Amino acid sequence: MSFKENNGIPIPQEDPYFYIDNETLDILERIHRIAQRHPVNVLVAGRQGCGKSSIVHQYAAVYQRPLATFQVGILSEPGQLFGEYALESGETKYKQFLFPQAIQTPGCVIHLEEINRPEHPKALNMLFSILSDDRQVWMDELGMLKVAEGVVFFATLNEGEEYVGTEMLDPALRDRFYVILMDYLPNAVEREVLIRKTGITEEQADQIMHAINLIRGNSEMSLDVSTRTSLMIAEMVGAGATLRESLVTSLQASKPTLESILLTLQMQKGFLEKTESEYLRFCRNVVL
Ligand SMILES: Nc1ncnc2c1ncn2[C@@H]1O[C@H](COP(=O)(O)OP(=O)(O)OP(=O)(O)O)[C@@H](O)[C@H]1O
Ligand SMILES: [Mg+2]
């Protein structure tokens, strides 16, 4: 199959520093093989910022497939992904959205974000038949829509602290997916990612990892530091900020929690000294 004809849906750029464990790599390889026989559904579950969207993106990049992403979390009615009636030069016309086009594009990777959070419980109804063995749905406005060969649906599901696993999802829907469970990267790999992606030094990466582990290891703080947050911290450090400034701006923590983190780090390492505040003018000729 060639995907040059991809209805204008772009094939994403590969992330040269994306890491996954060998087991997940094998699963993706097999998904790819199954997809050559018929469309397939994959559910990617994991905590916030652990790399769910990235793995879908990377799958499309590695296998050179067009990628179309849809926010299921904001849907409030069943047909909303497909199109809408709009007024055009005095006439009401049905305007098709990207979704019907994507499902009819051979080999397309379709990312359904936050599938567990549609605003309306019935919003997923029309997706059911597309994700089931039928692989087609009838619409008065568009006729019979059939899923093209080689299409892979990736649904991502955010696991909050309030629930674990995929129970949130309707059983009938969950049943139709292979499941990939993701978690944050092991320390050594995360450190590598920080260095490679943000250009910080090994020493800076060690300091950041130390701070992150302190927070992750303290269950009382109930503060999760995702891969996304650790990258934000590293990027801030790479842009010249102190570790203290980077933590203060990147962690979504309450003031007391933040103070206690900073205090502990300061006592342990002494690298979080706060400098005296002074007030400067923030205007163009001062900044440039
Ligand atoms: N395994 C990984 N290797 C390299 N970078 C990663 C990895 N996992 C996550 N990242 C980086 O971390 C950031 C967050 O990842 P991503 O947006 O994919 O998380 P997510 O699970 O989809 O988050 P959300 O729950 O908010 O949707 C991205 O910048 C991504 O590149
Ligand atoms: Mg995401």
Image (tube, grey):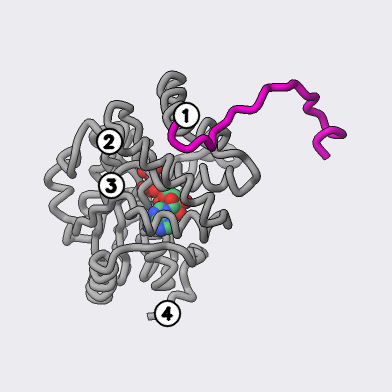
**Numbered label attached to residue 207:** none
Separation of marks 3 and 1 at Cα, in angstroms: 28 Å
Separation of marks 3 and 2 at Cα, in angstroms: 8 Å
Which residue: 56% across, 47% down?
Answer: 235
Confirm or reject: label 3 Cβ below 8 Å from ligand 1. Answer: yes
Residue ID for mark 4: 2
Label 1 neighbour load within 10 Å: few <14, some 14-19, many 20+: many
Q: In this rendering, does residue 154 appear at all?
A: yes
Q: Can you tell which quarter of the image residue 110 is in?
A: bottom left
- Judged by depth in the image, the label closer to the viewer, 2 or 4, is 2
Residue ID for mark 1: 262
Compared to residue 212, the image places residue 155 above or below, namely below
The residue closer to the viewer here, 286 or 105, is 286
Label 2 vs 4, first from the N-terminus: 4
Which residue: 37% across, 35% down?
Answer: 215
Tell me which amino acid carries mark 2: Gly
Tell me which amino acid carries mark 1: Leu
The residue closer to the viewer here, 66 or 83, is 66
Confirm or reject: label 1 Cβ below 8 Å from ligand 1. Answer: no
Q: In this rendering, does residue 11 appear at all?
A: no
Separation of marks 1 and 2 at Cα, in angstroms: 26 Å
Specify whether 233 is left or right of 128.
right
What segment is highlighted magenta in the picture? Answer: 267-288
Specify whether 262 is left or right of 163.
right
The residue closer to the viewer here, 62 or 140, is 62
Residue ID for mark 2: 160
Residue ID for mark 3: 46
Separation of marks 4 and 3 at Cα, in angstroms: 32 Å
Tell me which amino acid carries mark 4: Ser
Residue at the outermost top position: 256
Q: Can you tell which quarter of the image residue 79 is in?
A: top left
